[in-house]
Structure formats: C-alpha cells, structure tokens
Amino acid sequence: MKKNIYVCFALLLFVVSASIISSCAFTKDQPTDVELLRSIENAFVGVAKRSTPAIVGIISSRRAEDEKYHSQEGSGFIFRKDGHILTNEHVIRDAATIKVRLLNESEFDAKLVGVDRNTDIAVLKIDAKEELPTLPLANSEEVQVGQFAIAIGNPFRLNHTVTTGIVSGKGRSFLPDRGIIRYQDFIQTDAWINTGNSGGPLLNIHGEVIGVNSLIRRADNSPATGAVRAGAGFAISSNLVEKIGTQLIENGRIIRGFLGIGMEEVRRGIRIKGVYKNTPAYLSGLKQGDIIIKYNGQKVDDTDKFKMWVADSQVGKASKITVLRNGHERMFNVTIEEMPALQAGRLVEIDSVAWRRLGLSVRKLEKGDFERYTYLTDKDRGVIVDMVRVNSPIPIGTLITAVNGENINSVQELEALLQKQQQELKELVLNVKSSHGEEKITMQLQP
C-alpha cells in the first residue's frame, strides 16, 4: 500500500515539475511589451515604405471668376502600371491643367481619363517610360470595424504624410442628393486626414487599399470647413472605387439606369415621395405614396442598395417593380432610361444649335453605350440624346442616326447640318433608335 502511495506521489511530483518547467519556458518565449510594440511599429513602417512610391501628389489649376488661375493640391495613387491613377473628382473639378508629382519629385502632365461626380471618383493617366509601382485593392466587404487603418497623402503640402488609426465604421451614407444623385459607401476612420489628403489611399496593415480618402465630417454632422478641419474621416470603399475606376478606364464615363423618383426608407420598403414627369416611373404608372417592396424579385429595404440596383440596370430593359398601393401588391414593368446629364453631374451644351432649335443636347456614341443599352449594337452610328426639354417626343438615350435622310456620325455633323438649314426649314425628320425600336420622328424647329 505504502509502495503505491510513493509511486503516486512520485508521479504527481513529476507532473507538477514538468508543468512548472513548461510554464517557465512558455513565459520565457512570450514577447515583452516592448517587443510587441516594436512588432506593431515595424508593420506600420513596412506599409509606409512599400506604399509611398505608388502615392502621388496632384496639382490642378483652374480659372476663377477673376480670370486668374488658382491651384489646388490633393493626393492619388497609381492604379495600374501603365500610369492610370485614382483620385477624387473634386480634386480636379473644372481643372484647366493637371500635374502629377511622384515620390522622386518628377512631374508629369496628366490626362483626364474620366470622372464620376456621383461617387466623387476620377481617373488620370500619365505617360512614364517605365512601369510604375501600384497599390493593390482589398475587398472592402471583408473590412472589419476595429481593424487598423493607415492614411497616406499630402495634407498642407506635407508630402507623403502617414497617419494611423482604426476603422470606426463602414457602409456609411449621409450626403444628400442635391442636384445630382449620389452613390455612397463610406468607410469611417479616426486616422487623421485633412486638406490635401483627398484622393489618397486608406490602407490596411497589409498595404492594401480599403478606401479612397474623400471627406471629413464634424460633430454636428456638417462638412468641415476652414484651413484646419476636425472630425471623422471618410473614405470611398475600395470595391466601389475599383468598379467605377475600371468603367472609367474602359468607357471614359459611367452610364447609369434612371427611374425618376424621390424616395425615403420606411419600415416595409421604400416610399415614393414624388414622381418626376416624363420619367420611366411616371410613364409606367408608379405614383407618389407607393411603397416599393421588390425590384426584379429582390426584396427592397435599403435606399442605397436600391439606388445601386437601378443604376446597374441596363438602359432600355424592362425591370419589374412590386409596390404596395392602398394595402395591395401591384407589379409594374418599368423600362429603365439613362440617367439625365444633370443628375449625373455632367455639363450639357445648351448654347448649341441642336438645343436652341430642337430642344435636344446630344453627345457622341461611345464604346460603353453598346454594353449598357439593350437596343444598340457595335454596328450602330449616330449621336446619343443626353438631355431634352420638357414634353419632348424623344426620350433621353435615343440614338439619332439620320436627319432628313442624311446620316449623322458625330455631334459636329449634326450641328453643321442644323446650322446650314436653320433658316430654310421649319421641321426636320429624324431617324432614331430607342427602346421603342427604330422609327422616324418629325420635329418642329424653333426660330
């Protein structure tokens, strides 16, 4: 019996001793507080070193009302090795000239590839002799609130300033639709950003872009103003940036679907606050007070998501919209049109002969139109109607192929023809192509 007790005691002593030794070894292998901080510090330093060669300064010059040129500086980053650069649209808005400065202080004249005011994204292009360093884009859907965030840019002309913080929130949307329709998916951060950071990247700890720094908001939820701005920082999510940037590179512009309603989110869906005349919603029979509950079979419960669905819809294609009206479900087939130029934040030519005499503003036919308009093919030629006067018989997005039997291949050809015949004719016959098919429309000419 005593022998068994001695054996058990010996085994217990062995186990305890082994545990103590193991515990000591484990403790010895644990990093100290300083070593842990040094590891985090090295991660930030590494991201800064790897990323800054792809981050650029942007200097835009514009003519003010006093006829003098005023410059504005911002940031951007190289998106593709061939010199395509992503930045904010507001950094280069109305610019007469745009210059890009690299880390090595070399400067390039930049070409404006395309802009999208609805998301505040712009793409520039510089011609360098060698391949340029780029920043990879992360999947912003995988961004987690609380993760590290690193902002790099040029606030107050302090080039390649690095600040750190965390992701404070995601999926933010708060800018009102004033004049233009906004598409928003902001990542909120407490990393310090300020005047000049606009267009620069917000990075994760791997050096991947999770957003493009765009604006700052104060505690009272109004835009920050003044030389020094304080408040929460917001970056456009990388997934939205990549989507818009790629389309701008391919097509030079964004073609979005348009419904033509004012809306607000309610418990059961989205309530229509107003229906604009001669828009797809108006023509299909949708009414103020209807509550949209489904779009092409998908449940509608978020205004931002619904706006994206409509925007991504093909122009000329019928979408099924289910609403609650007086407590009963009703389904409408709505033929989506292209978003009008003004709502898209694009300037339209209203000093043209076409606008003065036909009430039409037109633009050239572009490669992207064949992909976004269901009724167009790559064999079509003509000009696209970009804006119309109220009660025009021609909808926005119509392709004009001929006038009085003469083929039209460009805006200049249409203007020249109208200029030549403006005193001789009282009406014109337009050959057009739209979601209604091919037809001839007679237009009365204004004096």
Image (cartoon, rainbow, N blue to C red):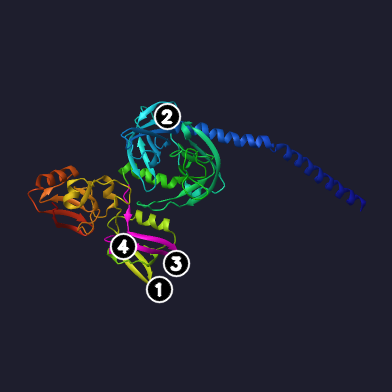
CA–CA distance between discs 1 and 2?
Answer: 61 Å
Per the rendered image, the range of residues in magenta is 254-282
Q: Give the secondary structure at mark 3.
A: loop
Residue denoted by label 4? 281
- Residue type, label 2: Leu
Does residue 261 show up?
yes
- Residue type, label 1: Gly
- Residue type, label 4: Ala
CA neighbours of label 2 inside 10 A, class few (<14), some (14 to 19), many (20+): some
Tell how many labels.
Answer: 4
Residue denoted by label 1? 327
Q: Is residue 21 left or right of residue 165?
A: right
Q: Are marks 4 and 1 in contact (CB under 8 Å)?
A: no
Tell me the residue at 27%/49% (across/down).
369
Q: Give the secondary structure at mark 4.
A: helix
Residue positioned most to the bottom: 327
- Relative height, residue 204 to residue 324 (above, below): above
Q: Give the secondary structure at mark 2.
A: loop
Residue denoted by label 2? 102
CA neighbours of label 3 inside 10 A, class few (<14), some (14 to 19), many (20+): few
Camera-side residue of 221 and 282:
221
Camera-side residue of 278 and 209:
278
Q: Position of residue 364 (x, y in %)?
A: 23, 45
CA–CA distance between discs 4 and 1?
Answer: 20 Å
Residue denoted by label 3? 268
Res 84 quadrant in image: top left
Give the mark nearest the N terminus, 3 or 2.
2
